[in-house]
Amino acid sequence: MSNPHRRRLKHYNDAGHAHLFTFSCWKRLQLLSKDRSRLWFIRSLYKTLKQHDFGCWAYIIMPEHVHLVVIPHRHAYSTSDFLSSLKLGVTRAAVKYLKLHHPAFLKKLLDVQPSGRQCYRFWQPGGGFDLNLWTDARIWEKINYCHENPLRRKLVVLPEEWEWSSYRDYRATRTVGRVPIDWKTLPDDPLREYN
């Protein structure tokens, strides 16, 4: 019997479409509030982009969730496989670190199913949010949405103050946590917000 509270996300792997992904940490815990865990995410994203041949157009790492705008380079691709690889890399790094350094905290990540099956979760189960993007205006709307997220949450006053996003790549002021932006495939911004 399926869980009535868990919605299945349908991914549309349409050739030429970019994707906005949004996914959250387990139980909305602020698991991405430390540089250590943010770097786990950066490393996993970098590896997953190469492994699945995707380009990154934008990202933002918030304390309890992530937004990504990515573009698959292949005609045939799987967003489910991409997300699984990305999330698994972060989960493995977190579990390994916590077993060695903070085993008591690891209990907060334990998910016990009604069947008795147990596993550690860094991310909420399911696919999160996946929106296909195919027009330049919509793509740039979502890139700007990602970059403005810390402002909406009142975590910073200016987007460049949030270290853990691609905004600084657009302004050429990156200092840490670099994920290469796929400039070659990025469409022109119809509003030319970035110079």
Image: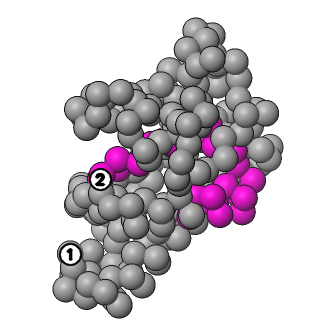
Quarter of the figure with residue 15: top right
Q: Quadrant of the C terminus?
A: top right
Q: Position of residue 45 (x, y in %)?
A: 57, 58
Inter-mark Cα distance, 1 to 2:
14 Å
Q: Residue furthest top?
A: 191
Which amino acid is tagged 2? Glu
Left or right: 175 in relation to 57: left
Packing grade of label 1 (10 A; few <14, some 14-19, many >=20) is some
- Identify residue type, mark 1: Lys
Classify 139 as above or below 63: above
Quick one: 158 or 46, which is closer to the camera? 158
Q: Earlier in the sequence, mark 1 or mark 2?
A: 2
Residue at which label 1 appears: 108
Residue 64's disc number: 2
- For the point 52% across and 53% down, which residue is it? 176
Q: Please tell me whether residue 186 is drawn above or below residue 92 in the rendered image.
A: above
Which residue lies at the image location 27% right of the left edge and 74% below the top edge?
109
Residue 118 seen in the current view: no
Q: In this view of the protein, which residue sits in the foreground, 173 or 78?
A: 173
Where does the image place residue 9, in percent across and percent down from the top left? Answer: 44, 48
What range is drawn magenta here?
A: 44-70
